[in-house]
Image (spheres, rainbow, N blue to C red):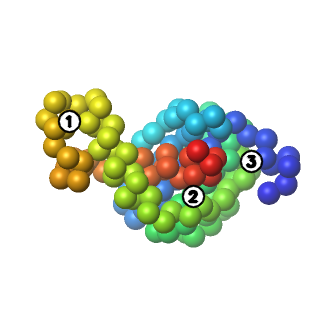
Amino acid sequence: MDKAKREFKYIIAIDPGTEKCGLAVVSIDGEIRLQEIVREKDLLGRVRGVARHYSPALVVVGDRTGAERFMELVEQEGIAELVAGVEAIDEHLTSQEARRYYLEERRRAGSWLYRIIPLGMQVPDQPYDDYVAVILARRYLGL
């Protein structure tokens, strides 16, 4: 990526999926500004709105499920013109990292029961694709 395109303040990270996708906006200093799960059919519209709101931004996309298709759609739908660039990033083991991250967050914010049961015995009670997106952004930033 050329130097002009490196001038961005936010990372918009996408964990593309077949039914649901993780979406996160992380500032270049690592602060999470947005973290959500979006239905696959609503993803492009949501990314367009987020890109307009958090400009200038770079989009990073996990390189596994649905990544190639999503990257093509970003070009076709004109979203690439709204951002400093679109890059794929290695998604290896992010689901395992995100599961642990989610469970640790739930433990901190949740009831005493989550604090006494070992993390390895806990099961997430909701999807955590948004945590994968946060991890992708932080990986890109080297955090």
Q: Quick check: can you spot residue 41? A: no
Q: Decide: is 95 above or below 54.
A: below
Of badges 2 and 1, the one in the foreground is 1
Residue placed under numbered mark 2 in the picture: 61
Q: Nearer the viewer, residue 5 or 99?
A: 99
Residue under the point 33% across and 37% down: 105
Which residue is under mark 1? Answer: 115
Instruction: Give left or right: position of 81 versus 41.
Output: right
Q: Amino acid at mark 3?
A: Ala
Q: Is residue 118 visible?
A: yes
Counting labels gives 3
Residue 138 vs residue 84, the one in the foreground: 138
The amino acid at mark 2 is Val
Which marked residue is nearer to the observer: mark 3 or mark 1? Answer: 1
Cβ atoms at labels 3 and 1 below 8 Å apart: no
Label 3 Cα crowd, 10 Å radius (few <14 / some 14-19 / many 20+): many
Mark 1: secondary structure:
helix
Left/right placement of residue 113 relative to residue 94 reads left
Label 2 secondary element? strand
Name the kind of residue labelled 1 in the image: Arg
| Coordinates of residue 4 in the picture (x, y in percent) | 85, 46
In the picture, residue 117 is in which quadrant?
top left
Image quarter of the N terminus: bottom right
Q: CA distance from mark 2 to mark 1?
A: 33 Å
Q: Residue 36 location, x and y as percent? A: 42, 42
Instruction: List the residue tagged with mark 3.
Output: 84
Q: Residues within 10 Å of mark 1 (few under 14, many from 20)?
A: some
Residue 18 locus on image (x, y percent): 40, 64
Cα distance between the residues tagged 3 and 1: 42 Å
Callout 2–callout 3 Cβ contact below 8 Å:
no
Q: Residues within 10 Å of mark 2 (few under 14, many from 20)?
A: many
The tag earlier along the polypeptide, 3 or 1, is: 3
